[in-house]
Image (cartoon, rainbow, N blue to C red):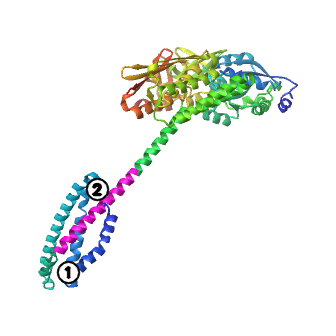
Amino acid sequence: MHPILGNLRRLGLYLFSWVPLVALIVYLLKVVGGLGWVEAAALGTPLSFLYALACLSSWYMCRTTTLERAAALQPALAHLTAAVVVSGLWVLAARALAAGLAQFAAFAGLNRGAEKTTGLIFGLGVLLYLLGVLMHYALLAMEASRAAKEREAQAQVLAREAELRALKAQVNPHFIFNGLHSISALTGSDPAKAREMCILLGDFLRRTLGLGEQSMIALREEIALVDCFLSVEKVRFGVRLAFEETVDADVLEEPVPPLVLQPLVENAVTHGVSNLPEGGWIRLRAARDGQSLRIVVENQFDVEAVPNRRNGMGLENVRQRLETCYGNSAGLAVTTEVDCFRVSLTLPLE
Amino acid sequence: MRGTRSLTSERGKKYRAIVVDDEDLARQVLRELLQAHPEVEIVAECANGFEAVKTVTELKPDLLFLDVQMPKLDGFEVLELTGTDLAVIFVTAYDQYALRAFEAHAVDYLLKPFGAERLRLALERVPERLGNKRLGGPGLGAQLPPPTELAAEARPPAQYLERIVVKDGTRVHLIPVRKLDYAEAQDDYVALCSEGKKHLKQQTISSLEKALDPKRFLRVHRSYIVNLERVVKIEPYGKETHVVVLTSGAQLPVSRAGYARLREVLEG
């Protein structure tokens, strides 16, 4: 869509801006071509507005050639050629118009006068066409910068949303309130343990806040976060919570998106272990599997329990984040076996 | 201690309390804080909902400290089965729907973590809650709305009941709604028919109807709610009425309005 032709308001403004140019052309026709005022105006006015429209054609060329310093010569030559051609056509149009007007007795002298102005019209034509080219480039640049700003703002909004989502999925208020309640219990019976719990909870919160800003972290760091989380929960649940971790040493430094394992382990506690009166186990395994990293989080659960209202939210969040980070090359699979709930992640390795 | 004055007014009699929480540390907090209230005697502690229902039924305490999130049965289900003829103080971490339900039903609650002062305030309301029950009149519990309503309000909006809890003596049955064939009104009770057995529960059929997913269950008659998945066919019965035949072979009467609703659901 042409930025000026496609918009009536802009077209009006553009044509209005030509009014002084029309006056100038008429004046030059009178002085240089030796025409009378009436003759100059009769020839110059329609000719000018015709050219105003002709200049708009340069947009189609500007659009396809970008202004980059390294390759500016070729488009410059192209525009110059176009300027010469369009201007030549304008001269022909001027001749035709003059010949047409000369049919009327009042403008009988136009034919002769028009010949004298050929050079002037051609020169003006080239100049005006090139001005048109500059105007179109300016318009294109404005458009591009506005689009870039819009994209940037959009990207910022998306990033902010992702961060918030991660935080929400992350710091479950229940976890903090219950942790604080455990501390409150321990201050009476076991102050040393209460202090340890404070440190664990603080450690966990600090790690979480730091992680939100990074796009990738080492698996080692994510596992440290999980350990920290489970240490807090272990104080709450005591012997009811059994945790087993098998992580191969050669995958510890592999990059993973932050906060992908922690929500899974948190689910394992809230929907698994905490629903079992006698408690249950959670197992975490991570190992290389050909060209990918395979991580499995599994937990025992109460087969009679009602699917919890928050169930699935953490999982959905992890699934979405994997998709943003890896597209289709990562996988998340959920399987259930008797009383074992298993989430398997497959992440591509470099 | 101010709390002591208000609570020992009844001839120095002690309140018998049961603490229900699956976390040892959480029970420990209450044990410790209640030491400052000699008028409250902890007669039992329970670590899950099944134990709680059994113990409350056996010991008939005056006061119940009840955790909301617990294994097996949650706090609302426990309350449904034990009735409101005792003072209940819910103890919970943050849960927006539960809090709204507590406030709507004027049930007291303690938010973890809580301290001695908040506990004292909750205990001050116990005599009022128990009302003149001990003098032979009905307790405040009798004036409170049924606990099924409290539980319904604590569910997030647009979430329907997934299972029904029923008490049989001190035993608790969990009936997943997908296993419920139909429910039949019997005075103040509903009979829940599931896997060839009937379980009686003290609840009105209308309140049960509201708690069930209308896409899966339909009130076909003033006294019957049917699980739509169990419907085999509808047969005419008499001049203007119909019966619905279920996979189990059971036949239930269908009212005229019920028939219209049934046709609408099954055909459209």
Q: Nearer the viewer, residue B66 or A225?
A: A225
The number of callouts visible is: 2
Q: Which mark is residue A32?
A: 1
Residue A29 in the figure: left or right of residue B66: left
- Quarter holding the C terminus of chain B? top left
Point out the stretch of residues depicted in magenta.
A119-148
At x 25% / y 64%, what residue is drawn? A130
Q: Per the image, is A142 magenta? A: yes
Earlier residue among tags 1 and 2: 2
At x 27% / y 77%, what residue is drawn? A24
- Quarter holding the N terminus of chain B? top right
Residue B30 in the image, given as x and y percentages of width and height: 74, 25
At x 88% / y 25%, what residue is drawn? B11
Instruction: Examine the rendered structure and indicate whether residue B33 appears above or below residue A7.
Output: above
Q: CA distance from mark 1 to mark 2?
A: 39 Å
Which residue is most to the right? B11
Which residue is most to the front? A70
Residue A44 in the image, given as x and y percentages of width and height: 21, 76
Instruction: Examine the rendered structure and indicate whether residue A259 appears above or below residue A130.
Output: above
Residue B118 in the figure: left or right of residue A332: right
Q: Nearer the viewer, residue A183 or B193?
A: A183
Amino acid at the residue labelled 2: Met
Tag 2, which chain? A
Q: Which mark is residue A1?
A: 2
The answer to whether residue B162 shows anywhere in this view is no
Amino acid at the residue labelled 1: Val
The answer to whether residue A232 shows anywhere in this view is yes
* Kind of element beneath mark 2: loop
Residue B181 in the image, given as x and y percentages of width and height: 51, 20
Q: Residues within 10 Å of mark 2 (few under 14, many from 20)?
A: few
